[in-house]
Image (cartoon, rainbow, N blue to C red):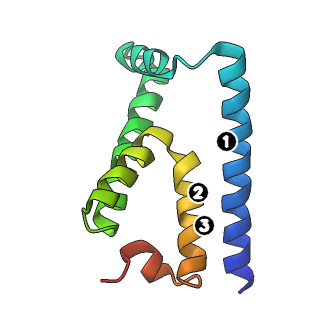
């Protein structure tokens, strides 16, 4: 019970912190994320390597979400959102699943299979 609540608290803190950080950056630098992201990736520098690694993490997350939701239309929509929004999607999604499954890790990971 304590670990479940701790994990839920971490997800809430992650969501709040990434949302505040994103809001600040968007206000200060604008919302031209994709141009910055892909130009850095194409630069073949360590920053680009980090962006490429993160982009692949987002692809993996999107594939997992689509698979978990059984590749329905809802699953595809959620996967696209997961790929674009990253942790701003994943933290609330996992938090929702943690409540829906009463913290059952197997159900969180594989759904009702």
Separation of residues labelled 1 and 2 (CA atoms): 10 Å
Q: In this view, does 19 lie above or below 45?
A: below
Kindly indicate the quadrant of the structure image that contains residue 30: top right
Q: Distance between the residues labelled 3 and 2?
A: 6 Å
Q: How far apart are marks 1 and 3 (CA)?
A: 15 Å
**For the residue carrying disc 2, how many other residues have a C-alpha within 10 Å: few (<14), some (14-19), or many (20+)?**
many
| Disc on res. 18 | 1
Left or right: residue 100 compared with residue 67? right
Label 3: few (<14), some (14–19) or many (≥20) C-alpha neighbours in 10 Å: some
Q: Mark 2 points at which residue?
A: 91
* Relative depth, front residue between 97 and 55: 97
Q: Is residue 43 above or below residue 4?
A: above
The answer to which of marks 1 and 3 sits earlier in the sequence is 1
Q: Which of 34 and 41 is in front in this view?
A: 34
Q: From the viewer's perspective, is residue 10 above or below residue 87?
A: below
| Pointer 1 or 2: first along the chain | 1
- Quarter of the figure with residue 10: bottom right
Residue at the image position 39 percent from the left and 53 percent from the top: 78
The image shows residue 72 at horizontal and vertical percentages of 26, 63
Tell me if label 1 and label 2 are in contact, CB under 8 Å. Answer: yes
Residue indicated by mark 3: 95
> Is 51 placed above or below 35 here?
below
């Amino acid at each position: 019970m304590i670990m479940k609540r701790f994990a839920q608290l971490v997800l809430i803190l992650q969501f709040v912190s990434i949302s505040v950080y994103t809001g600040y950056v968007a206000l200060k630098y604008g919302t031209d994320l994709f141009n910055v992201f892909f130009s850095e990736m194409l630069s073949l520098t360590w920053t680009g390597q980090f962006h490429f690694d993160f982009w692949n993490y987002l692809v993996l997350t999107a594939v997992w979400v689509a698979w978990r939701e059984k590749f329905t239309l809802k699953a595809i929509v959620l996967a696209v959102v997961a790929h674009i929004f990253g942790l701003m999607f994943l933290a609330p999604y996992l938090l929702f699943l943690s409540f829906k499954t009463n913290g059952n890790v197997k159900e969180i990971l594989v759904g009702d299979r």
